[in-house]
Amino acid sequence: MSGGLYAFFFDVDGTLAAIQSRPDEAFIPDPVRDTLQALSRLSDGALALVSGRPIHELDMLAAPLRAPAAGVHGAERRDASGELHRISLPASMGQELSDTLHNAMAQWPGTQLETKGMAFALHYRRAVQYEDEVMQLAHKLVERFPTLALQPGKCVVEIKPQGVDKGEAIKAFMGEAPFAGRIPVFIGDDLTDEKGFRAVNALQGISVKVGEGSSEAHFRLKGVNDVYAWLEQIKLQLDQDKTTSVRSQGYESLSSRI
């Protein structure tokens, strides 16, 4: 079965989409979306998006591809059969968090609150002078609600349920068809992706960090344009494997192209 060696997992912002000053300005270029569709087909559907964004946003960014996906760092997950698994916050907790965050962040011009239902993202890319205030607010709320945890990122900190992360989401996918039994490949760029890298490394997979900074990933790409070029190489490799009915030699073949 061509493509049956690999299970592909992709972060979105900073990996498939260049970082923008506001989350709603991000986009995946049309040729990259075409490549993702091809990779999904060539890998027999073993391709998933793993992101801090909600799944409905991932669907819009990747359209017309509607892949398995883990949104909000795994707090919601759609498996290959289309079944949705979701962790929710108690209604009273969610309302208190929303009210407190809206009132506090309204005092800091340029900051942005992104409400995700079961999580909240506090953005300060356009107002880095308020980083300390935003972080203090986030820590205060997690102290108040011990079932919550913080997830720092690039000019953002998220408040989310404990035990939810990209590593757990990838492990859940790897226990299911069509991902099970394959070599996992995960590409990401941020602190939020480190637990994903750790999970993939434990499964003897291929972990790829995009950009600078320390990381547990075993491989490195410089930026999103390098990701795009690498995806094209992998598409060509899998397409050739399918045409010739000969699969490339696993880990060495794919990782050598990084």
Image (spheres, rainbow, N blue to C red):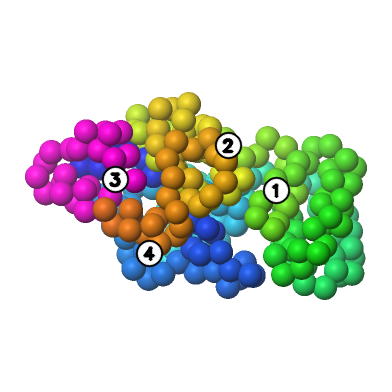
- Amino acid under disc 2: Lys
- The image quadrant that residue 222 belongs to is bottom left
Which numbered tag is attached to residue 33? 4
Mark 3 lies on residue: 257
Q: CA distance from mark 2 to mark 4?
A: 26 Å
Measure the alpha-carbon separation of dots 2 and 3.
Answer: 24 Å
C-alpha distance separating marks 4 and 3: 20 Å
Q: Residues within 10 Å of mark 2 (few under 14, many from 20)?
A: some
Is residue 126 within the magenta segment?
no
**Could you say whether the residue bearing mark 4 is in a helix, strand or loop?**
helix
Residue where numbered disc 2 is placed? 195
Q: Is residue 124 left or right of residue 144?
A: left
Q: Which residues are magenta?
A: 234-258
Residue 152 marker: 1
Do the CB atoms of the residues marked 2 and 3 lie less than 8 Å apart?
A: no
Is label 1 or label 3 in front?
3
SS assignment for the magenta stretch, majority: helix
Q: Amino acid at mark 1?
A: Pro
Sequence-wise, the earlier of marks 4 and 1 is 4
Front label number (2 vs 4): 2
Q: CA distance from mark 1 to mark 3?
A: 31 Å
Residue 250 makes an appearance in the image: yes
Foreground pick, 29 / 7: 29
Q: Which residue: 51% across, 52% down?
A: 211
Crowd tier of the residue under label 4, counting other residues whose Cα lies within 10 Å: few below 14, some 14–19, many 20 or above = some
Tell me, yes or no, whether the two marked residues, 2 and 4, touch with CB atoms within 8 Å. no
The mark nearer the N terminus, 4 or 3, is 4
Question: How far from the left and from the top, in percent, is residue 217?
Answer: 49, 38
